[in-house]
Amino acid sequence: HNSDQVKEAALFMQEHDRFLVLSHVNPDGDATGSALGVCLMLEKMGKEYIVVNEGETPAKFSFLPRFDLLRNLSEESLDDTFGAVIAVDCADESRMGDVRSLFASGAVLLNIDHHPTNDGFGTVNLIRTDAAATAEILYDVAIAAGVSFDEELALCVYTGLLTDTGGFRYSNTSPRVMEIASKLLHYGVKPGDVAERCLEEITFAHVKILRRALQTLTLSHQNLVASITVRPEDFVQENAAREDAGGLVNYCRNIEGVEVGVSFVESEPGVIKVSMRARDRVDVSAIAKHFGGGGHAKAAGCTMRGNLADVQSKVWQVLGEAVGVKVDE
Ligand code: 5GP
Ligand code: MN
Ligand code: MN
């Protein structure tokens, strides 16, 4: 372990008094759990903070402590700047989105993340690509900072671990993940309740988007690639939000024999969120990076602009090279 960087991260929190805490645009469970976990740590250290994101945090995470303090920069403007910033689960500067407008000139930034594509954009960088979740790294920072764990902090860390391992099922589920999860349960986390909120419960709008998306499911590249598409009109007609289209890509990847699953979610015309999931042969983070995004070898994504057909043909082209099969029309 890079324990020097863990100590440096703890020192960063001790050295400053007022923080801007942020995670990535359109945050997921690890981003949200880690950001709120940092907030709880700062409170215990007697520090002031605000916690901001670009894009709405899914309501399913509302069981997390301090959820009500999360500010959504897409809906409100803030007239303030900060000299000390803590970014969690952000692989590069662009993942912070418009929250960057709140940085004071010369602001110092602590970058805590686990993405192999992280470019070390912080003043202090704590990047561990062997960590299953940013929350796993946060667990070490809390200990290094001498912060005591309680049920609330444990719940934040546990939520990051649970969601980024797909419910302790993905290959990033290490012995250490299970050891930390076990310790967190001892602080009172109720695993059944957290799993119900994060993984089991779905909105009706999600099911309606899923029903439409499954009708678009297509196999290509000699059945090694499966893809799904959601269009702006699907959201309008089902009265659904962008977050209702999460997780669709897994239906593609899970099909027997498929190497790469990909979803194209166009929530507003011309803006296409591409999510990719690999079984084992392909490193989808390299493909996402090629298109300006990033992620992990088996789960990565990017946002592409333009006409859907053009975006799809570009992605299929690169995927074809990755799986060693030309795009079949
Ligand atoms: P998802 O497809 O669920 O949005 O994201 C899968 C993984 O890829 C996550 O680890 C996420 O952080 C990363 N990812 C998704 N979109 C982007 C992006 O636009 N840029 C970067 N750097 N990473 C992304
Ligand atoms: Mn994330
Ligand atoms: Mn993560």
Image (tube, rainbow, N blue to C red):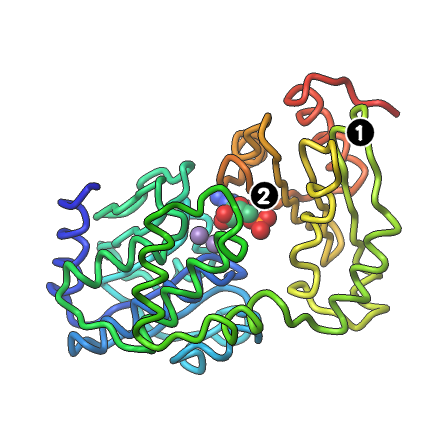
Residue type for callout 1? Asn
Residue 117: x %, y % from top left: 42, 37
Residue plotted at (39% across, 45% down): 174
Helix, strand, or loop for circle 1? loop
What residue sits right under mark 2 in the picture?
Answer: 302
On residue 83, which mark appears?
Answer: none
State which quarter of the image contains the N terminus: top left
Residue plotted at (18% across, 46% down): 5
Residue 126: x %, y % from top left: 26, 47
Q: Quadrant of residue 58?
A: bottom right
Residue extending farthest bottom: 68
What residue sits right under mark 1 in the picture?
Answer: 223
Residue 49: x %, y % from top left: 27, 74
Q: Nearer the viewer, residue 17 or 10?
A: 10
Q: Quadrant of residue 19?
A: bottom left
In this rendering, the answer to whether 24 lies above or below 261 is below
In this rendering, the answer to whether 185 lies above or below 256 is below
Mark 1: give few (<14), some (14-19) or many (20+) Cα within 10 Å.
some
Helix, strand, or loop for circle 2? strand
Looking at the image, tell me whether mark 1 or mark 2 is earlier in sequence order. 1
Residue type for callout 2? Cys
Badge 2 residue CB within 8 Å of ligand 1: yes
